[in-house]
Amino acid sequence: MPPADYSAKLFNADSGFGRDNRSWALGRLLRDFELEQQPLPANVALCITVFKASDSGTAGVPDLDRWWWGGVATIVLQLCVSAIPFGLYGDWSIFLVTVAGTILALVTGALPQWRREKWACRRESKKVFLLTGGNGTRNVMVIFSNGKGLDLEDLAGAESPMVSRPGRHDLPRVFGLPGALLITQVACLFLLVLWIIFLITVTSIKQHAWYLLLVGGLGMLQNAFAAGAHRPIGTSGVHLEKVREFRGKKVMHALMDFEVAYPKKCQPLLREFFPGNLRQAEEKWWAGDRTDYDEERRKKYSEKYVQQPNLVKLSKSK
């Protein structure tokens, strides 16, 4: 898998341990969520959104969205375009090359190793995770796994497939390498030979090559749009259900609201967003003496940003 293309930090809400994300899938999860949130009102300094793992899909199996079906439609359109010279001139070479290229592309993308690398983590986690772009960003995702979701700490580590922990149904190791990885390497070598033959065949086509150029252009356009598009959260293989969100005119207020609703889950975020010393009134609030600061806040800021304690029951995390 490629490296993460979107900067993110992941924290364990219980242990307080944080790490920089190296997972492509986890980075895309945060990117798509932030695109979904835009535009946040200018007076919102921080938005903390709470999710819990959902039963709507299988962890590690992405949902199919319009962009996935758009890929299917593009393949059908490419085949239709390539069949035009076959129907008009009896030239079947364009259609044959298009079919062969489509099969090679689908087989290359369907190798099971890619899925294993993309979601290289334990399942049925009970941890609580905090996912954010870091200090200075305005969105935080809080994820209660509840024994259903992926272990995002494993996922953020993005271990090499040569050293990652074995899965439940993995093949035995061969020559010191995971069996699945060795099979993938052999398959890729075989596919490499087929791709070279395919490219040599394409360069030999002299007639009606414009149809082949159109076929390739359609595929490149679909790939470009799909790669940059906002995708639903479920397409990342992480299935979540939104519980509630906290918005604050000040970052500190949003963190306080979250702490009231979910006690002892906010310390990693407090250290991330406020790495220096707190004001005396803030230190008293986090130490448990909250009356004075809360009263000052009610007078100075709009009441609608003051959240009530959490009313949603979530299973205890471990």
Image (cartoon, grey):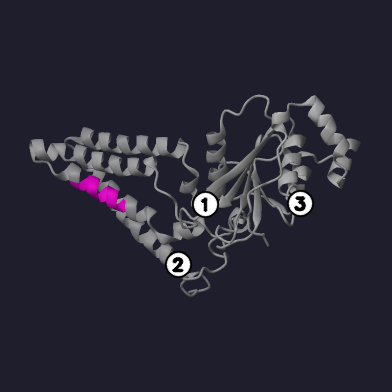
Nearer the camera: disc 2 or disc 3: 3
Nearer the camera: disc 2 or disc 1: 1
Nearer the camera: disc 1 or disc 3: 3
- The image position of residue 151, as x and y in percent, is 59, 58
- The image position of residue 266, as x and y in percent, is 74, 47
**Few, some or many residues within 10 Å of mark 3 (<14, 14–19, 20+):** few
Residue 140 drawn above or below residue 143: above
- Name the amino acid, label 2: Ala
Residue occupied by mark 1: 238
Residue 120 located within the stretch drawn in magenta: no
Secondary structure under the numbered disc 1 in the rendered image: loop
For the residues labelled 2 and 1, say whether their Cβ atoms are less than 8 Å apart: no
- The image position of residue 262, as x and y in percent, is 71, 49
- In this orientation, which residue lies closer to the viewer: 147 or 111? 147
- In this orientation, which residue lies closer to the viewer: 4 or 282? 282
- In this orientation, which residue lies closer to the viewer: 302 or 104? 302
- In this orientation, which residue lies closer to the viewer: 42 or 193? 42
Is 261 on the left or on the right of 29, as rendered? right
Question: What residue span does the magenta drawing correspond to?
Answer: 96-104
- The image position of residue 193, as x and y in percent, is 33, 57
Secondary structure under the numbered disc 2 in the rendered image: helix
Sequence-first tag of 2 and 1: 2
Residue occupied by mark 3: 264
**Few, some or many residues within 10 Å of mark 2 (<14, 14–19, 20+):** some
Residue occupied by mark 2: 180
Is 280 on the left or on the right of 133, as rendered? right
C-alpha distance separating marks 2 and 1: 23 Å
- Name the amino acid, label 1: Val
C-alpha distance separating marks 2 and 3: 42 Å
Q: Which residue is depicted at the point 45% across and 57% down?
A: 114
Is 184 on the left or on the right of 168, as rendered? left
